[in-house]
Image: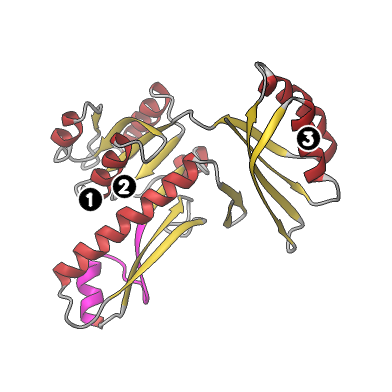
Amino acid sequence: MYILCLNCDDRPGIVAAVANALCNSNCNIEESSQFYDPFSNQFFMRVMFSAVTEGAAGKFRAMFETVSGEFGMNWYVKEMDEPVKTLVMVSKDDHCLNDIIYRWRTKHLNIEIVGVVSNHTVNRKLCEQFGLKFYYVPTQNVDKSKVEEQHFSIIGETDTELIVLARYMQILSENMCERYAGRLINIHHSFLPGFKGAKPYRQAYERGVKLIGATAHFVTKNLDEGPIIEQDVMRIDHRDCPKKLQIRGQDTEARVLARAIEMYAERRIFLHGNRTVIL
């Protein structure tokens, strides 16, 4: 099974051209979804297809070069079952890391965890328990450029595609954000209103908020303002103490981050300026 993703300026005949190319290559469409954005005149399409005969997928790729050129498409084809090589970055809190490891072990996420990077050692035992490579890269009282060089080296050595910040409490440089644009996913505790700085759940309790939530987004040079992938909220009330808010909030964070990773692994996310299109 394969996944074709494409986007281009909208015009008549795109869907027909894709379907004809697949049919003429002896491939069969299993699932298809598309979206037209009237504000930018951009067309987005995701097609899951199977190769009916041996070599059909390769034949389609060759044939589609001509089709994509005619329509000015940005496109790619990936094997559906090929796991996404994923590097997880974490500091001390392990709720998201634990959840990702569980979903990876139980095949609920189509990823290959190539390693875990941390600026603390508290999660080393957890990672090694499941045979995961643990990279300790301290960030205190060190040259941040040297830290970044180590990150680049690990990403290159592991052939990482997706980088997940699973509560990694460090600000990434503009250089790193731009170098891995569209491949860095972060999870952020988002509240209404928003609380910044230390102890956000205590701040939420003191303000008597009624909803807590989490946002998974792509990382950009603008802190916590990257294109949003997934969000969720949970209703709470005055009886929930700060500790209970934190427990419930961390559960929401883990679930939202897992859904974002799943969408990425299934090639459902299209970056479109400051927003995303999910097909």
Q: Earlier in the sequence, mark 1 or mark 2?
A: 1
Nearer the observer, 275 or 219: 275
Residue 64, position in %: x, y?
Answer: 76, 29
Asked whether disc 1 touches disc 3, contact meaning CB atoms under 8 Å apart, the reply is no
Q: Earlier in the sequence, mark 2 or mark 3?
A: 3
Give neighbour class at mark 2: few <14, some 14-19, many 20+ (Cα, 10 Å). Answer: many
Which residue matches tag 1? 95
Q: Amino acid at mark 1?
A: His
Q: Is residue 214 above or below residue 111?
A: below
Give neighbour class at mark 3: few <14, some 14-19, many 20+ (Cα, 10 Å). Answer: some
Label 1 to label 2, Cα distance in Å?
8 Å
- Mark 3: secondary structure: helix
| Region in magenta | 188-206
Q: Amino acid at mark 2?
A: Ala
Give neighbour class at mark 1: few <14, some 14-19, many 20+ (Cα, 10 Å). Answer: some
205 within the magenta span: yes
Which residue matches tag 2? 166
* 1 vs 2, front mark: 1
Label 2 to label 3, Cα distance in Å?
37 Å
- Mark 1: secondary structure: helix
49 within the magenta span: no
Which residue matches tag 3? 68
